[in-house]
Amino acid sequence: MLRFGLRSKFILLSCFLFLLPWLGYEYVWEMEKFLRQGQEKTLVGTTRALATALHERPALFDQQTSFLDQVVKGRDLYAYNLKNPIQLDGKLTDWESYQALFWQYDKRYLQKTDNKHQASDLSFEHMVGKFDNYLYALFKVTDNQLVYRPKNSLSITNNDHLKIGLKTPDGQFNRYIIAPRQDGWVNAFNADSKAPFTKIQGYFSSTAAGYNIELRFPISMLGNKLGFAIVDVDNKESLFEPKVMSTSNLNNPSDLGSVLVPSPEINRILKGMGHSGSRIWVVDKHHRVLAQSGSIHHADGVWADGLANQAPETWWQQFEQNYLHPLYYKILTRPENEFLDTLHDVAAMQGSHLAKALKGQPASSWRLTPDSKAVILSAAYPIWIQEKVIGAVIAEETTNGVRTLRNKSLEKLFNVILAVMLIGTVTLFFFASRISSRIRRLRDTAEQAIDAQGRVTGSINYSDANDEIGDLSRSFANIVSRLGGYTNYLENMSSRLSHELRTPVAVVRSSLENLQMQPQSELSQKYLDRASEGVERLGKIITTMSEATRLEQSIQSNEPEPFDLQKVINGCMQGYQLTYPKQLFTLDICQTALPMQGAPEFIAQLLDKLINNAIEFSHAEKPINVSLKQNDSVAVLTVGNYGPLLPAGLTEHIFDSMVSVRSQQMQQQPHLGLGLYIVRLVCDYHNASVTAKNNQQDNGVVFTVSLPLVK
Amino acid sequence: MKKIAIIEDEPAIRENYTEMLSAQGYQVTGYANRSSAEAAFKNVLPDLAIVDIGLGNEIDGGFLLCQTLRSLSKTLPIIFLTARDSEIDTVCGLRMGADDYLTKDISLAHLAARIGALFRRMEALKQPADENALITRGPLTLDTQRMQVFWQQLLVDLTVTEFWMLHSLAQRPGHVKSRNELMSDAKIYVDDSTITSHVKRIRKKFIALDSNFDCIDTVYGMGYRWEQI
């Protein structure tokens, strides 16, 4: 059966200590929630501060686009802020980092619907960007048949060309055409006057799939409307109408798509906010980014300030960093500064917070980066102009600051918990060990206090401890001492009885003797003799009764002496053969010296009692077997006889005081069951053991005494 | 007429002994307790005192009385006759200067013999030693008349019981005397271990005089014998 000791129970209970880290974690988690809310509020505050700077400043926002009801991707263009200058060389290397921003124009953008149109016939990728004071545009055109402008041709439209339509800041609608004769530098022509227009410069280069056009013009000539059209002429004879794929309809100024150029004014204002530790955007009401500042990778709010990892100085910090932190960060996640940011260089912002802000409500939202490495908090605040929301300020921060803060506090918490658990477990363990060892000690002493025969062998050393175990040990000691007293009383019964009986016996005896001195009639003499005989027997009983007591007393006062066991047993056996001439003995006694320490007279007495016992129970004519052998450091003496078997269940007790198992016929002589008790007393004195067993043939009894020898 | 005092709290025993000893021709007075005995002894001392240890309420009244008697007379024979047979009591009684320690198992005849022996010894001590009564076994000399034992001319202070036991052994050196024989020779009836402790006590008394004494030999399972040097 599985048995749980006190110690293991304590250990089990102390497992509840492991709830501590969970509680601590929950607590810190709550704290983090509050911190996040705080961060959210702060961030909303940041956006509000910026929005406040932008309220009611219509000059900062382009009226017309701002008040458009909707912007269409592809039609309404957005000039991205280019970070690097663009070299007009027809190669796309300068644009590589903006690859993702290219907008794909396909047959949906054809002026005339043509279901048979193939992407290889005509399609293009396009983007506009702003660098310095120039607007840059790129076209990566796929065209299976490139038709240059013929030399000396006055017409600039009977070939593949690029049409540009724009409105100037003062509202004038201008259209320009770029129709290259060959790869290389190109300038635009005014579409109406066909006069060259050098403010628009570009570079044309053919590619395997079609051609690339890079061009630029000063931003100052651009109002808020801009459109491009690629006109694909596949045949010089113009049997077919040229295919026109455009960003917006260039023929009608009102259909022209809008263009949004990030506002330098707002940018300047934003720069002032750039030190707030957040990434900030200003978007118009069409979600288009007007300005942006800061990088999300450095925007972790102001929470982590001063918590930056310092080099460990003390041994404790080193230990913490080398051993504890790796352990902790198996559970915790360290906020990472490297994560994917989908909003990097976007033109249009999306999100519930923005949608809400554009409806006039400040809002915030949380989102996970696609690689799940960081959580980004965004807050949006509407910008008002004349009771209308014109745009919104968006601020973004990662929660890394809060998480760093949380991690730091968790580290500290874990340290404390680890210490508490360690100390607690160790304390509990020692406590449990102490208690269980005390109980075990108590159990051992309690078991040792009473031997297999139920005799009290000693007293219990009780402890002075003022607790339950101490009480228990004291009450054990009490019980054992009372029990010992009682056992003692029982064992002394015979001596007490003999003492008490002696006086009345003496009265009877002396009276009888006195009586005998008087002349008696024959009849009274007969009775007198009988009475004397009875008293004689009584006297014998009393003597036998006191024998065990006397032996105990002499054992107590006896000084052990060295002697040869073999000599004693041999001598005794010779004596018995003389004393009991009718009894047959078979002897098997080793002839080597068996040195022992003790009292030879007692050993002789022991053998006396065993032989007496054997003779009494032996069948007539059957021998008594006596053997003495050396077995390592123990001498084994056996006395066996053939006769009645031992009664079951009494085997252990036949060596007790006043236990006799004689049948009624054998009771002619007084027997008090003290013979084997004396055997046991002698054995105890010599640290020997005695057992009585039925022999193997089950026709007699063997007594075996194992006496330790002196080495 | 010899005067014997019996100090015994049990009236039946006291009277039986008194009657028996009176019949033997002694002048016997019985006392039931220590105080009455001591009061009587102040006037006149008896020739022999038979004392029980437990006297009425006094568990060790006999011992106290023995001390008082010894302070009054160095030579007065004292016999303890008691129901107590423990080793400690025996040793105690003999240490206090009693001449013998008997248990109440003893028969009246034996008691009378012992009393007679004690008186004989008292008488004999007054007279010059009779050469005929001496038994000599090497360094051991037994004066059977005075019941005295000398080892290398030094007196060994044995009780009457012990004397008779030693006498029994020394009479026929080399012969084994069983415990029963020793018992009957010493005119006592006790158990085996009492004999053993008697023999031990005798040995001790000799060894006190001569640490090399080794003349009483134990023959295991049979008894003891006097080993002649």
Image: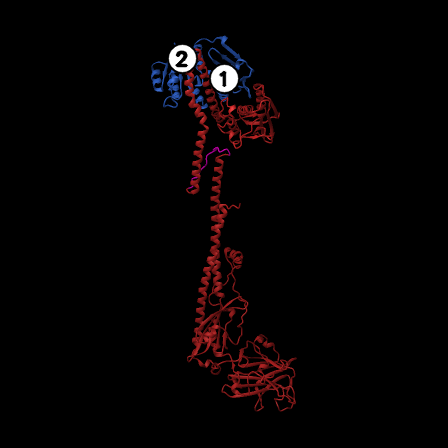
| Residue of label 1 | B183
Q: Amino acid at mark 2?
A: Leu
Residue occupying image coordinates x 44% and y 31%: A486
Using the rendered image of the protein, determine whether residue B96 is visible from the camera's viewpoint.
no
| Residue of label 2 | B21
Q: Position of residue A375 (x, y in %)?
A: 50, 67
Quadrant for residue B76, please give it.
Answer: top left
What is the chain identity of the residue bearing mark 1? B
Quadrant for residue A634, please give it.
Answer: top right
Q: Which chain is blue?
A: B
**Chain A shown in which color?**
red
Quadrant for residue A362, please give it.
Answer: bottom left
What is the chain identity of the residue bearing mark 2? B
Using the rendered image of the protein, determine whether residue A430 is visible from the camera's viewpoint.
yes
Which residue is outermost to the front?
A523
The answer to the question of whether label 2 and label 1 lie on touching residues, with beta carbons closer than 8 A, is no
Residue bounds of the magenta highlight = A452-465
Using the image as rendered, state which of residue A617 and residue A300 is in the foreground.
A617
Residue occupying image coordinates x 55% and y 21%: B221
Could you tell me which quadrant the C terminus of chain A lies in? top right
Q: Earlier in the sequence, mark 2 or mark 1?
A: 2
The crowd level at tag 1 (other Cα within 10 Å; few <14, some 14-19, many 20+) is: many
Decide: is B25 above or below A241: above
